[in-house]
Image (spheres, rainbow, N blue to C red):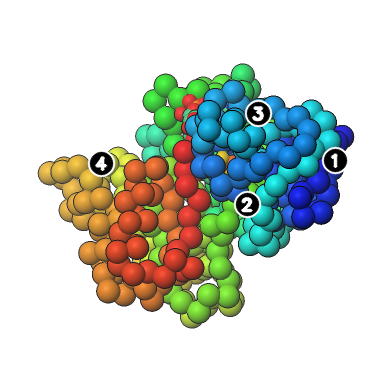
Amino acid sequence: MVEIRTESGETFECADGDTILRAALRVGHGFPYECNVGSCGNCRFELLDGDVAHERADPPAWGERDLKRNRWLGCQARPASNCTIKVRLDDHYQSLHRPARRQMRLTEIRSITHDISEFCFAVPAPAPFLPGQYALLYLPGIKGGRAYSFCNIDGDTGTWSFQIKRVPDGAATGALFNQLQAGDTIEADGPFGMAYLREDAPRDILCIAGGSGLSPMISIARAAAVNPALAERNIHFVYGGRSPRDICGEAMLAELPGWGTRIHYTAAISETDAGWIGRTGFVHQVALDLYGDRLPEFEIYFAGPPLMAAAAQKMLYEAKAPVDQVHFDQFY
Ligand SMILES: Cc1cc2nc3c(=O)[nH]c(=O)nc-3n(C[C@H](O)[C@H](O)[C@H](O)COP(=O)(O)OP(=O)(O)OC[C@H]3O[C@@H](n4cnc5c(N)ncnc54)[C@H](O)[C@@H]3O)c2cc1C
Ligand code: FES
């Protein structure tokens, strides 16, 4: 255990093997972050005194310039001594449910499409999280945690479930889909993430999901459907895949109270297919076609692969959706 001190005087302890970001979040400090896996750079800090080493040898968001300026990534930096750091803490990043490491047991794998499955784990309760948040999963034989978003809601006490898309030749998803079996135990850390359901937002909800982005959008829709504070809100859900066999989500929404009245689902494929009678186009474009000038009136959540997320962000910016009404955690 070592002590981390910020230039402005906050102190917190960091356990052996933990990273500076996660140690700060565990005790309620608002250390800026987003991805938790070394890819976004939001957790960068300056090391004023002490020694750290990165967990991941080659984090994409870190390079020579950072090394020269003694800047490190909070989500990757493991301290080797007491440290003093320069970072601007921000209450926005404080966790309502403080993240913790826990063992969890795989109870069930449910197939959703040809390459998406839902992995359900039993966790030692209580393990609360907010709809739209994610956890880091430590998989057998895989170095470092991988981020996966919850698809269930906190009411399902003692269960953490994730809808995960298999990546061809992917190491982490290979371990999940090929190795893990019901009864196996893995370590998880969480919850994390800022793209959670805003329960107090007085607006209809729009969820835009592409491929692997299904999970957090389903969690948000499930939570919004049963939250009395949001009973007057419409929930619009747009899901995009490449071809008809990628399309899913409707059956999960159809189980919710409000289906057919205030819950609306649209699917779109991006490739042409003679047998498809729904919409065709990229999911962000379909959302624009559907809601156009009304986009600034929604509380908007989106998730999906990096190219889709970048296109959705640009589209929403150009459509003048206010930034504080748009919520996403970039996938990498
Ligand atoms: C906030 C967030 C939420 C996500 N939610 C979901 C979700 O709900 N469903 C879903 O299917 N996917 C989700 N993802 C994507 C997921 O985390 C993986 O990137 C994806 O499953 C890649 O799997 P793979 O088999 O290709 O992994 P791999 O082949 O293991 O690696 C691919 C990714 O892992 C990174 N990586 C490599 N080494 C390390 C290391 N030591 N530590 C950390 N990262 C490393 C690589 O840069 C690359 O981006 C999310 C990602 C983020 C950041
Ligand atoms: S690089 Fe650390 S949170 Fe993204």
Q: Residues within 10 Å of mark 2 (few under 14, many from 20)?
A: many
Q: Which kind of residue does numbered mark 2 sit on?
A: Pro
Eye-nearest disc, 3 or 4: 3
Residue at position x 41%, y 46% from top?
304
Q: Which residue is mark 4?
A: 243
Which of disc 1 and disc 4 is earlier in sequence? 1
Q: Which kind of residue does numbered mark 4 sit on?
A: Ser
Mark drawn on residue 32: 2
Q: Which residue is mark 1?
A: 3
Residue at position x 25%, y 41% from top?
243
In which image quadrant can residue 237 be found?
A: bottom left
Q: Which residue is mark 3?
A: 54
Nearer-the-camera pick, 22 or 10 = 10
Q: Residues within 10 Å of mark 3 (few under 14, many from 20)?
A: some
Label 2 CB sits under 8 Å from any ligand 2 atom: yes
User: Hey, which residue is sitting farthest top in the picture?
Assistant: 141
Q: Which kind of residue does numbered mark 1 sit on?
A: Glu
Residue 58 visible (yes or no): yes
Residue 161 visible (yes or no): no
Q: CA distance from mark 3 to mark 2?
A: 17 Å
Secondary structure at numbered mark 3: strand
Mark drawn on residue 267: none
Which of disc 4 and disc 2 is earlier in sequence? 2
